[in-house]
Image (cartoon, rainbow, N blue to C red):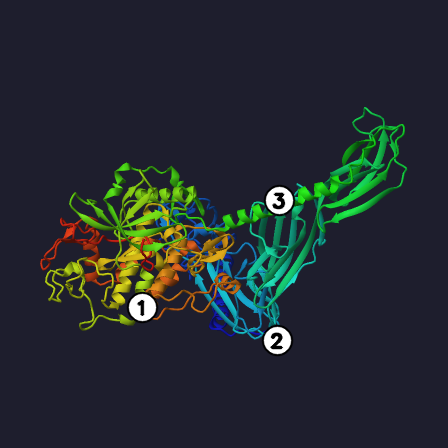
Amino acid sequence: MYLSLSCTHIFLPIILYCHLICMSLFTFLISLHVFYQKCLPLSLLLADSENPFVRSMLDGLLVREGENGTLACLVTDPAVTHLSLLPCTGSALPAGLTYIADPQRGITIRNVSKAFEGCYICAGEMDEKPVKSSQYNLVVRLVPETVPVISLSRIENVILIQGQEFVLNCSTININHDISLSWSIPYEAIANRSQNSNILPGSREYKLSTGLSIESVKMTDSGVYRCVARNEKGDSTAPVNLEVYEHGFINLTEGEDSVMEVREGESLTLSVEMTSYPRPTKVYWTYNNQQLKNTSEHVITLHNQQYRFISELRLVRVHESEGGIYTFSAYHMYASVNRSFTVHVICKPVIVSQEGPVDGQVRCVASGYPVPKISWYYCEPPHARCSHLLNATQADEEFTLVTVSGAKFGRSEVESRLNVTKGKFHTLECVATTQGEQAYTLFSIRERTVPHKLFTPLLSCVVSTAVLLSFFLVVLLYKYMQKPKYEIHWKVIDSFDGNNYTYIDPTQLPYDPKWEFPRERLRFGKILGSGAFGKVVAATAYGLCSADTVTTVAVKMLKPSAHSTEKEALMSELKVLSFIGNHINIVNLLGACTVGGPTLVITEYCCYGDLLNFLRRKRDAFFSSKTGDGYYKNLLSQIQPSREGTDNGYMPMRSYQKRSNQTEWCDDKDDLSLDTEDLLSFSYQVAKGMDFLTSKNCIHRDLAARNVLLTQGRVAKICDFGLARDITRDSSYVLRGNARLPVKWMSPESLFACVYTFESDVWSYGILLWEIFSLGNTPYPGIPVGSTFYKMIQDGYRMSEPEFAPSEVYEVMRWCWSADPLKRPTFKKLVERTEHLLSEITKRDYLNLSTSGSCEVFVPPDLQRAQRLSSVGSSTASTQPLLQATNDVFLEHQSI
């Protein structure tokens, strides 16, 4: 044991010692004064009318709570009568205060309590006049009722690995400062100690604390550490046992039998108990090498008490097919453990098949677990059961018992054959028994004619032909089911509880006939995109915005080979688009043709195609900052094409160049340069569009740069490709199960649990940001999709900062990729964060764009013909203006 030499340990005993000396001296003087008064002959006391009380050498009295205290107010004249005690303030005595007045001894206060503390005087009467003594201050010293109560920062056992820090704090509270704390530690341990004390606010109690720490524990530091507290009532101790190990461990506790049986339909709980330090990184159960999820049929729980863990797997209402090997696994960086349980499901016996009698033989096949025992009984009809008769005759003939098939953990089939002869009995019963459960079947003993020899080959031929045809039908059906089905990715939520979302059936949404547009006013042009189910075609719409306008639009239609399901899906997409409404940053619905021919969905047209290919085309023309003449000017700002100022508040863009053979306001090539402000603008606009979809309770489920389109003014619009992309040829979609999914854009909960929420769209938005600021690179570069990729995502792998991303943008990406969906930002917060990164010019530019309608006319003064910014209109048929956006990614141009 080491002695602590802190200042508190040195001076506190000295203070207490001085206090005891003073108290002893004070008590001695009072005792001497009383003794003097007792022994002094009364004849020597001189009556003093001016000083009726003896002047005391002490004006204070220190008394322990619960004891009696005497104020030595002795009278000098026997004429003083009616001796009493009064507070100095003249108020009433404290409640409960009682005393004994004696002129020769003074006034004794009995059973002193803390409430009696204060200033008092002795009073009496002399010659019918009141007289008073000098003042006495009564000080009450509180006394603890019990030994100290110790509070430790850690209790019971503490386990550490060699090199870790050990910190232990001990404190106690006492009614007075007569309290001490000390440590008792193992002999070889060397620890740093500290101590402090203070008076608790709002009370008169003292709190004393002491700390003990070892910066880097060693194996020799193991042992019991005791905190010892001492007050006037005695000592108390609080031990803590420290165990130091060389490295972490997981130790399984011997438990129940590893081979277990359970009846079908009953429940079974498998339990594993272990001690572990540190806490296991992962604890899970597997069934036949497949990891189990926590479901209503397989309830997995983990109980923890300090270093002890109990994991339970409850199999609810076990089915016969659930027999097998269940394995518990746990691991951390130092160790891993496994424990397997073999579960056999006890199944009731069932008669699988029966045959006979044929050629004097009957056959009975039964299944169950354990393997059923088969018995045979004879009887005369009419009887429901032969075996239930008191005089039942059990077959004495030899019968053959053969195991047809044996399941390792569940049902096994057994076959019994019995040779019979036609006699006095006409009924035969086959009884299968397993652990008290029975199944039976009855045979009527009548000789059956054996079929002709040619019958069996003919029957076999017919059966073989039928099986072959069935096989081909199954293969064709399988191939048909494997074909990707056309469906709209956007889902509109009806209600949700946690991650349980209920979606609105799009087929039940209403369709407003106001969207109908005469199909004879459409003139089709080039194919913009083509997929497995349909295509998107550029078209000219006459009179879409007003009677005399000509508008370039994108028309989505099905191929002639489309099935009814695809037609219904396209109609559902039309209803969803009309239900959501319009926003500048989504591809908006302009009209539809649903009667008098195939369904046509008319949407906005985009001149620059999808954002992914746009970024890749602009990679060589990217500038990290806008300097010199390399920056561009917004089309809205071109009031004076030769001027590069920003007086009108719009983003500067390169001057519009008029060409003799170009009449469209939107240039498909977009020769202008690209800079960081453009990338931030794309990010902001997509966040705005997704915020709008979220406000409409709509989940996108496939947010990526390939599903964002650009139109004039570099306005970004979110779309759903649907039928316009052949996902079987798109490397971004990987076959997982029976569906092709955009794996690298999916959140962990969508990837592993098929859960799609607003938060999973936020994850995809973070991947889209990475695409934008890498200028169109494929996410997770160099990592193919496979088991290694899935393992990396489960282990928390995140992509590094892309080449052109500012640090603030990468922080947003990491925020979107939070493992806990609830910790990811909402799209409203993402709008605020990205808006904060934009310049004021870009903000004003976006504001002006968002306030303009789809069919609003914009006329630059230097142009001779009227042209529109969004749905551009013209009164002359020869002018073919462009609309704002389309709903699909542009593929190579094809002719219709």
304 sits left or right of 870 in the view: right
Percent x, y for residue 49? 36, 53
Q: CA distance from mark 1 to mark 2?
A: 55 Å
624 sits left or right of 455 in the view: left
Instruction: In the rendered view, tell whether residue 217 sits above or below residue 533.
Output: below
250 sits left or right of 787 in the view: right
Q: Where, by quadrant of the figure, is residue 219 drawn?
A: bottom right
- Residue at mark 1: 806
Q: Earlier in the sequence, mark 1 or mark 2?
A: 2
Q: Secondary structure at mark 3?
A: loop
- Residue at mark 3: 316
- Residue at mark 2: 188
The nearer-to-camera label among 1 and 2 is 1
- Circle 3 crowding by C-alpha within 10 Å: few under 14, some 14–19, many from 20: some
Percent x, y for residue 239? 60, 63
Q: Nearer the viewer, residue 498 or 524?
A: 524
The three-letter code of the residue at mark 1 reads Pro
